[in-house]
Amino acid sequence: MALLDLSKQVALGIDIGGTNTKYGLVNHRGEILEKGSLKTEDYPTAEEFADALYEKVSPLIMKHCGQRHFDGIGVGAPNANFYTGTIEQAPNLRWKGVIPFAKIMTEKFGVPCKMTNDANAAALGEMMFGAARGMKDFIMMTLGTGVGSGIVSNGRLIYGHDGFAGELGHTIVKPGGRKHWSTGSEGSLEAYASATGITITAKKMRAEFPTSMLNDYPEEEINSKVVYECATKGDPTAIEVFRYTGQKLGEALANFVMFSSPEAILLFGGVIKAGDFILKPTKLHMERNLLPIFRNKVKLVFSELDEADAAILGASALVW
């Protein structure tokens, strides 16, 4: 009997965001054979979105593997439930309520579809193809517009009884603190350690320090990228913005370490482009807040995967 050539077995990995969706055909080696994108917000319903995606992807499937070698679809999406294959009450999508997305995709493409939330997909990508290869216990933190997380323990993602475990970005790090712009909670990690949170911190701090380079920019142009540019030029206020952000993140990570005792915490997303400006204070405050038994054991590392590809790779890993 001929051996199966795994390089010909292909999965479709999909990363659904509030504005854009990225997709790619991925083989067993973690090679993205072809990828593309479409605007999520252009489609009022999930069914219309699936139709548009099928039109774009089906020619690629036939080109690279044919239907015989097309194994299935993996999806990373906000508020996606691994157990039920549904997207539930996602605040940043046009599709409201509970959407049976995996069912819609299976009916459209004729192959199995599995789902998880976007941060869990990124964690799977790191475990199979990135910095977490060989690790059985780690936490993935995605630091972008928001803060997401995926917790891997004993080689398995933690989903909880209902599929929604691991929302570490919404844990409270400062009781009664900054009000979250979407959830309304006060003092969540996302309100401080996300790119959005950094922008809020920068606007507050520049008002306190009139000589800061940050005051050279109009209010609407202040964002985490501008803060980084000012920090690289030696602006003390911009550097303090990252130090404060790193402190809040490090304090939170100490709690997470004492919860699951991971081998490593992987940081991923646009915020990590700040490099040591955020990594050093994060590490300092994490270690400072750990019990002695946990200190100097947990690696704090940046993702090895290209930001644009990690979620696609992780979503495809759901298939296998």
Image (cartoon, rainbow, N blue to C red):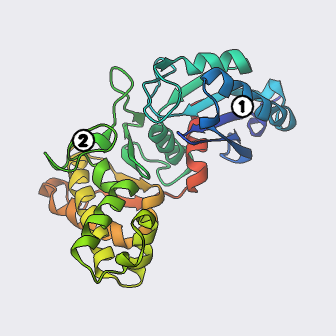
Q: Quadrant of the N terminus?
A: top right
- Name the element at disc 1: helix
| Left or right side of 277 for 131 | right
| Left or right side of 244 for 108 | right
- Name the element at disc 2: loop
Q: Which mark is residue 53?
A: 1
Give percent across and percent down for residue 302: 44, 60
| Left or right side of 226 for 14 | right
Please name whichever residue, 290 or 40, is drawn nearer the observer in this view of the structure.
Answer: 40
Please name whichever residue, 211 or 47, is drawn nearer the observer in this view of the structure.
Answer: 211
For the point 28% across and 62% down, the residue is 201
Residue 112: tell me if it is visible: no
- Image quarter for residue 10? top right
Label 1 Cα crowd, 10 Å radius (few <14 / some 14-19 / many 20+): many
**Circle 2: residue type:** Thr
Give percent across and percent down for residue 126: 50, 48
Please name whichever residue, 240 or 294, is drawn nearer the observer in this view of the structure.
Answer: 240
- Image quarter for residue 21? top right
The residue identified by callout 2 is 171
Residue lying at the far right in this picture: please name it.
Answer: 63
Label 2 Cα crowd, 10 Å radius (few <14 / some 14-19 / many 20+): some
For the point 39% across and 66% down, the residue is 219
**Circle 1: residue type:** Leu
Spatial CA distance of label 2 from label 1 is 35 Å
Residue 320 in the image: above or below residue 303: above
For the point 66% across and 18% down, the residue is 106
Mark 2–mark 1 CB contact (< 8 Å): no
For the point 45% across and 76% down, the residue is 229
Please name whichever residue, 89 or 34, is drawn nearer the observer in this view of the structure.
Answer: 89
Lower sequence index among marks 2 and 1? 1
